[in-house]
Amino acid sequence: MSRCVAKPFTRVAGDAAAEPLDSTPMNAQQSRSGVDRVRVRALKDAEDARFAVAHPKSAALLARGREVMPNGVPMAWLRGSYHHDAMWVAEGHGAHFTDVDGHEYRDFNIADMSMFCGYAPEPLVRAVSAQIARGNQFLLPTEDAIVVSEELGRRFGLSKWQYTSSATHANTEVIRVARVVTGRDKVLLFDGMYHGHLDEALVELDADGRLVPGERGIPRDTPAGTVIVPFNDPAALAVALERRDVALVLTEPAITNNIGLLMPADGFHADLRRLTRETGTLLAMDETHTQVVGPGGLTARWGLAPDFVTAGKSIAGGLPFGAWGMTDEIAAVLEQRKGPDGERSNLIAIGGTIFGNALAMAAARAVMTEILTPEAYAHTARLGARLAAGMRASVARHGLPWHIHELGPRSGYTFQPTPIRNGAEGRAAADDLLTRLIRIWLANRGVWEAIVGAGPVCSVPAQDEDVDAYLAGWEELLSVLTA
């Protein structure tokens, strides 16, 4: 799930001497998009009302759900991620899903990347059905785990793999292992990141430039173990790592899961790898979102050499699944020793009862070997390029100062004319109201692009007519905004 925060960040968080970056005044944020704020508000109010009227069955289910679930939904994000009331789904097939009120949507959010394979693909249905009939969980391994590990190793270039039930869990385990390997406790993250709902990643700076828990429920002392620096700033990174108290740098190859798309500057990854090696710091690439660009994600495409790779979501076709790969040297630390009577020692705090279960491994094997093929990645990249080109042409036609980005099957919009270079610039360019107007406008026209901070992604079963529908809704909205 993407998460969007709007706080000023220091150059090196965790350093009492660091000075906060200036935050952009609200009126400047509002004027950057080049559209009339009053019109945006009026349009959004009208579209929200239209959506509510069109979903009476969803409204009834929400009212019923409130009797038995907080917020009326089984997970808080299903209420908090949208301004409108929760929409309830009936079924999904291919690149489309249908809600309980009978409306069909062309899905460009694909459940925040987890359904990149599409809904109910035949190889996945076949594999999962067969495995559930044989038994879905044993707390013992099945051969599928070897096949999946071999395939992940081939794609990402790391030789050893372990499994969890989510990418959040994978990142949590990597941090713990890195602490054991290095003898250090801190983790370094980049401003603008989101790596799941683990404590260390839910940290931000308050108005005084101090690291604080970003959400309620995080222990007050958690920020002491986290360091945050700007992406694309090797100098700030060097200062933070020189203290030699950081066990792990955890980052996406390109930051995608919070503020749009933040691409690395030329040479940044080379500097990152050099600095981590010089200071004895381990490096993890979180490919949970960026793996959709091709086999091996951006790690393979850009020839990166991390110590860990973490992933999840679409690898098992949306089933609960996480994976983390590591080098042989790190894997050796995980080898458990047993005494003469089978007693265990040197244990690391990793693992879970349903991690690596037979059902998830069968799903991942089918997805990796039959669905996420080189041809599928080429197809989605072509659609993504076509979507970005169409959005770019429409923005130019209407004279809007927006940048349209593109990364494989993913496109999106930034409300400034140039790509963002760091998290602070991404927050300054953000316009939550306008973004929410775009997504509710599209939803009312049968196109689902749900989460603020993400952007449209073309799934494996998507077709040109789906891109056409997105571009038609996009062009219609821009025409109304600039009339």
Image (cartoon, helix red, strand yellow):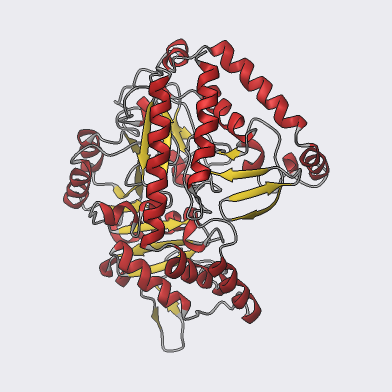
In this rendering, position of residue 87 left or right of residue 311: right
Q: Is residue 21 above or below residue 390?
A: above
Looking at the picture, does residue 179 appear above or below residue 393?
A: below
- Image location of residue 132, percent across then percent down: 63, 75
Residue drawn at x 58%, y 13% is 39
Total numbered circles: 0
Q: Nearer the viewer, residue 36 or 74?
A: 36
Q: Position of residue 274 (x, y in %)?
A: 17, 48
Task: From this view, report whether residue 331 is shown above or below residue 169.
Answer: below
Q: Which residue of the protein is positioned furthest toward the bottom in this rendering?
A: 340
Say whether residue 104 is left or right of residue 292: right
Residue placed most toward the observer, 9 or 195: 195
Q: Is residue 7 visible?
A: yes
Q: Position of residue 174 (x, y in %)?
A: 39, 58
Question: With 402 as the anchor, is 265 left or right in this view?
Answer: left
Quarter-of-image position of residue 104: top right
Query: 68 left or right of 235?
Result: right
Q: Depth check: give the residue in front, 154 or 43.
A: 43
Q: Is residue 141 above or below residue 237?
A: below
Q: Find residue 32 and report its image quarter.
A: top left
Q: Residue at x 24, y 43 (%)?
A: 241
Does the image show residue 210?
A: no
The answer to which image quadrant residue 441 occupies is top right
Q: Position of residue 69 (x, y in %)?
A: 76, 46
